[in-house]
Image: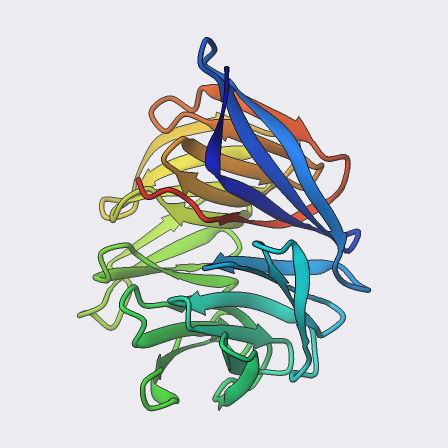
Amino acid sequence: MMVKTNFEVIVGTYQKYLVGISLGKDKSKESFNFVQSFAEEAHIGGIKCVAASGNYVVSGGTDEFIRVFDMNSRRDAASLLQQEGTINCLKFIDDSHLISGSEDSTLCVWTTSNWKCIKTLKGHKGAVNGVSIHPKGSLALSVGKDQKIITWDLVKGRNAFVTNIKEIANNIIWSPSEKHFIVLFDQRIDFYDVNVAAPVQKVTFAKDVNCASFLNDSILLVGLENGCLEMVDVSHNKSLKNQKIHDSRIKDICVTNKGILTASSDGIVKLIRKANFGDRGSTNLDCRITCMTIFNPESD
């Protein structure tokens, strides 16, 4: 008997397509089957980022558009155009709002009730590379090509303070506990305590860092350029495990209660175990994957 998980894997591709994958498991087997659930030509340029919350999946691309898909009806719900440049990052604020970061240096806050832009946040002097929402939804952190971290008060709709980091950061991610955040550089991740201005740890890597995801508040999963997945205790700057998972660069990581999902630039999506990175199933989409998210994940 085949039992489906209650989440779908959503990937964005360089070839402009948004692709959905359902996972099912035969009760008599340990591995999962991957079945493509949809493929939508969402953009007229490459897709850079995807996010999911509530009934919606959103994607942003080099065509400057944000596309909104209603996953209940499996139909296009909206096309948003406000910013003048590639949409580099998308994050939901609960189910009620969406924030988008653009090459044009702005962040836009959208309400999901009618998909209107209700606020444009200006503070960066260059492209916004990454944004992360505080778990309680009241604050956001962003990094950009201007070598700054900006903390945004989302209640008041303005920046609270600016930190100069003197390097271009590629992304920024809050920890699950709200007490820490990480900043991603080309071959380094800086680990911050919210009560300390400077990084409390700096973790370096032999290869370029493409993505990262918290397994818990101090254990980090890092996807590298050479296809390796590294598990790091960032609070103690200690590598716990490094294993070759893909033949090409890892583009994104998602943690689910079924294991760790990884996506590589050569079109492979894999599900592996948290404890030993053991294989639980994979699929080859025959495309260039750029990003990945989970629609309606179970909580761990």
Residue furthest out toward the top: 28
Residue 21 picture quarter: top right
Q: Is residue 300 above or below residue 53?
A: above
Q: Is residue 278 above or below residue 196?
A: above
- State the residue at coordinates (54%, 42%): 8
For the question of whether residue 47 can be seen, the reply is yes
Give the camera-side residue of 141 and 154.
154
Q: How many marks?
A: 0
Place of residue 197 in the rendered image (x, y in percent of width and height, measured from the top left): 24, 73
The quarter in which the C terminus is drawn is top left
Name the outermost residue toward the front.
Answer: 73
- Compared across the picture, whether 299 is left or right of 283 comes to left
> What residue is shown at x 40% (from left), y 31% (from top)?
258
Tell which of 203 and 224 is nearer to you. Answer: 224
Which residue is at the front of the view, 97 or 275? Answer: 97
Q: Is residue 201 left or right of residue 115?
A: left
The color scheme shown is rainbow
Residue 62: image location, x then y, percent:
73, 68
| Residue 56 percent across, percent down from the top left | 54, 60
Q: Is residue 131 visible?
A: no
Residue 192 occupies quadrant:
bottom left
Q: Residue furthest left?
A: 195
Relative vertical location of residue 175 with respect to residue 224 in this rendering, above or below: below
Q: Is residue 10 above or below residue 231?
A: below
Q: Position of residue 198 (x, y in %)?
A: 27, 69
Residue drawn at the location 34% of the way across and 39% of the way down = 232
User: Horizontal placement of 260 versus 225: left or right?
Assistant: left
